[in-house]
Amino acid sequence: MSIIIESFDFNRLEKLNDHLLKNSNKFHQIIKCNGEIKEISKKLDDYNEDSPISSVIIHLSVKQLIKNEQLVSNYRKFIEEIRVKRNMKATFIIVLMDYEKEREDKHFSVISSQFFQAKASMVTMSIESIVNALSVISMSMGNSGIFSCPICKEYGIASTLSQDELREHIYMFHSTLSLDEIMEDIPLCPFCDKPMSQGSRIGTHIHENHGPKGEKTEKELSLSTIYPFCLVVVRRKRDNTFLLVNEAAGRGYWLPGGRLNVNESMQTCAKRETKEETGIDIELKGILRVEYSPMMNYSRMRVIFYAEPVDENQLPKSIPDYESVGACYVTVDELKRLNLRGKEPVLWFNYVSNGKPIHPLSLLSLENAMLP
Ligand SMILES: [Zn+2]
Ligand SMILES: [Zn+2]
């Protein structure tokens, strides 16, 4: 494999130079040129070896790029030219954005996105990352397997790799491909020949079906079951009392609340459960806490609301039914004399009585809701 390196100052690439020296047996040719597009173009024109150019490294000074917007645009066009006019689809193009003073990454996002649009493979501020990437690049030149990359094989890159090697190659070389380009360039999975369907990423397919042995895929690791609950701390201001449910079957007194129904919001559930269990209509005033508790096979999420009765004179429910035996307002002192189902009423009633923070209801919203 051959590498072309264009740099405005090779002295700054000490770590890279060291690495190339130590691993010189892996490289057919390392062609260096100094800081100009026409220089590197000439090197590309003159290159006529059998060994493919597996990587082009372009070393640019951020100071220069910021001062001279034309420079960004020139290099952008140049990378496009390498890809399109020179048809170097398989070459790994690295842009090193070098911060001469400190490694602050101001301007990195905007400038790097332009190089990515031009189909750069990697844009980085880190020479260490280039050294690490070179190991995948040289591995892509190996011949220890039977698999080949549908994009790179015709250029003599990644044509005889093991499954693990080709997987790493595809992740690094082709992760910037759009879905349309994947369909065109990699229509079939190189391992199982399964067609890549519209909108599916080759990376995801390989990760889920041909991942490293013994490692769980993200699909297997991802949690599919979350049980959502809400609890409500309802305070009647006029006498500083709190609403408790006398739960059926002698389970004790507890906060109103319960598990969400299908297609129900937390807020609706809080009002519904409070009405069913206590007979009281409430107005939600805030959120005390959002709890998420991961467990082995599922997770539980609870939102604890703060609310006040709409009508302080409305009497709590006293006819037993499926939902509860009844409900009542209690003072913090009276809690000691009741059989509680857990300690939360004591904790939260004291919390609210002591004027601790109550978070705004807007903390909990639907996805894409308008911002306050
Ligand atoms: Zn490839
Ligand atoms: Zn497959």
Image (cartoon, rainbow, N blue to C red):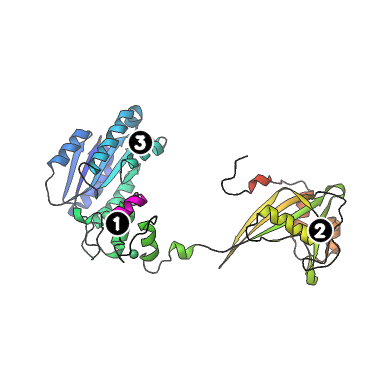
Other-residue count near label 1 (Cα within 10 Å), few / some / many at <14 / 14–19 / ≥20: some
Q: Quadrant of ligand 1?
A: bottom left
The answer to which of 149 and 56 lies nearer the viewer is 149
Earlier along the polypeptide chain: callout 1 or callout 2?
1
Q: Quadrant of residue 25?
A: bottom left
Label 2: element kind: loop
Looking at the image, can residue 103 be seen? no
Q: Is residue 321 above or below residue 25?
A: below
Q: Position of residue 152 (x, y in %)?
A: 23, 54
User: On the image, numbered disc 3 is attached to which residue?
Assistant: 99
Taking the magenta stretch, the answer to whether it contains residue 224 is no
Mark 3 → mark 1, Cα distance in angstroms: 37 Å
Looking at marks 3 and 1 on the same chain, the residue that comes earlier in the sequence is marked by 3
Q: Nearer the viewer, mark 2 or mark 3?
A: 2
Identify the secondary structure beneath mark 3: loop
Q: Is residue 307 left or right of residue 104?
A: right
Classify residue 195 as left or right of residue 371.
Answer: left
Q: Quadrant of the C terminus?
A: top right
Examine the residues drawn in magenta and state their main secondary structure. Answer: helix
User: The residue under label 2 is which amino acid type?
Assistant: Gly
The outermost residue toward the bottom is 249
Q: Tell me the magenta residue range.
A: 176-185
